[in-house]
Amino acid sequence: MSEQSPSQTPQIPDPRIEKLFLAGLHFGYSKTRRNPHMKPYLAGLKSNVEVFNLEKVLIKLEAAEKILEELGQKNSMVLWVGAKPQAAPSIQAAAAALGHPFVHRRWLGGTLTNFTAIRKRGQRGMDLKREREEGRLEKYTKQERVQINKMLERFEHAFSGLELLTRLPEAMVIIDPKEESTALREATQLGILTIALINSDSDPFSVTHPIPGNDNAPASIRAIVEILQSAYEKGKRERLQNHDESKPDKTTP
């Protein structure tokens, strides 16, 4: 049997690229919506829809993974942001698993740039919530309790996910920075690192570490968020392992 030449050897698809493809990460928007800076990451058109070059996307994704791993090694705080319905469940799940703050509803203006005032408002809401949970609202009149409950409803809607934002974050993961323009603007103003899943209609230079791809489908969003979450968890494990190895061995005489 004759051996196959290198050119005849069947190529084995990269399993990571295959995973991204199956998640639909390669689908962008129509060509008319293209941001010119996204051209290097595009492979062509399919039914008038831009298609991303997943090999180039993977390079950017692996760079973002490295950043998340380093953040995990430092136990840095990451704020996860994705308020649109397609992104909210994945953002909430990843942040909850990591014990990080998140925004899965409308961004509250000043969350970062007016952090001290926003934090005070949030703390007041958390104090009242604790009083209610402990049954300590009885000291208020019935009318006051009605007003407090209404205020707590507004608080829980506005601050849900931000209870753990006790300081400015070291980094922010954003799904669709064009949709989350206020959040991105505040982070940029304060020099906070931004990692974002960004579609063909957005400017990749607007964020620190762009991940070009479909930011509009739940499956593609979930795939990217889970990858970034895993990268942070890997870094955190390495940190704990290094910490354990640095401890003196008490069994050694």
Image (cartoon, rainbow, N blue to C red):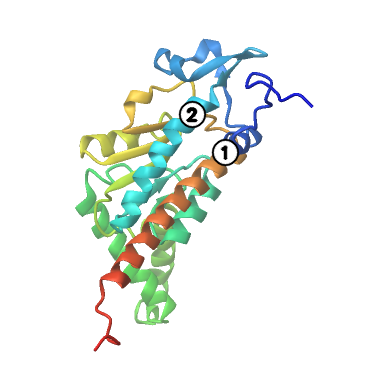
Residue 93 is left or right of residue 192, and the answer is right
Instruction: Name the quadrant containing residue 146.
Output: bottom left
The kind of residue on which mark 2 rests is Val
Local secondary structure at mark 1: helix
Q: Which residue corresponds to the image point at 42% horizontal and 56% vertical from the top-left?
A: 234
The crowding category of the residue bearing disc 1, from other C-alpha atoms within 10 Å (few below 14, some 14 to 19, many at least 20), is few
Q: Which residue is mark 2?
A: 57
The kind of residue on which mark 1 rests is Arg
Q: Which residue corresponds to the image point at 20% horizontal and 53% vertical from the top-left?
A: 116
Local secondary structure at mark 2: helix
Residue 82 is left or right of residue 44, and the answer is left
Residue 126 is left or right of residue 226, and the answer is left
Marks 2 and 1 in Cβ contact (< 8 Å): no
* Residue 16 disc label: 1
Q: Is residue 132 above or below residue 183?
A: below
Q: Position of residue 162 (x, y in %)?
A: 36, 56
The answer to which of 211 and 7 lies nearer the viewer is 7
Q: Which residue corresponds to the image point at 27% horizontal and 85% vertical from the top-left?
A: 252
Instruction: Name the quadrant containing residue 156.
Output: bottom left
The answer to which of 190 and 223 lies nearer the viewer is 223
The answer to which of 166 and 76 lies nearer the viewer is 76
Q: Position of residue 140 (x, y in %)?
A: 35, 77
Q: Is residue 98 above or below residue 226?
A: below
Tell me if I can see residue 59 in this picture. yes
The quadrant of the image that shows the C terminus is: bottom left
The crowding category of the residue bearing disc 2, from other C-alpha atoms within 10 Å (few below 14, some 14 to 19, many at least 20), is many
Considering every residue shown, the one lying at the far right of the view is: 1
Total labels drawn: 2
* Residue 231 disc label: none
Tell me if I can see residue 141 in this picture. no
Q: Position of residue 6 (x, y in %)?
A: 63, 22
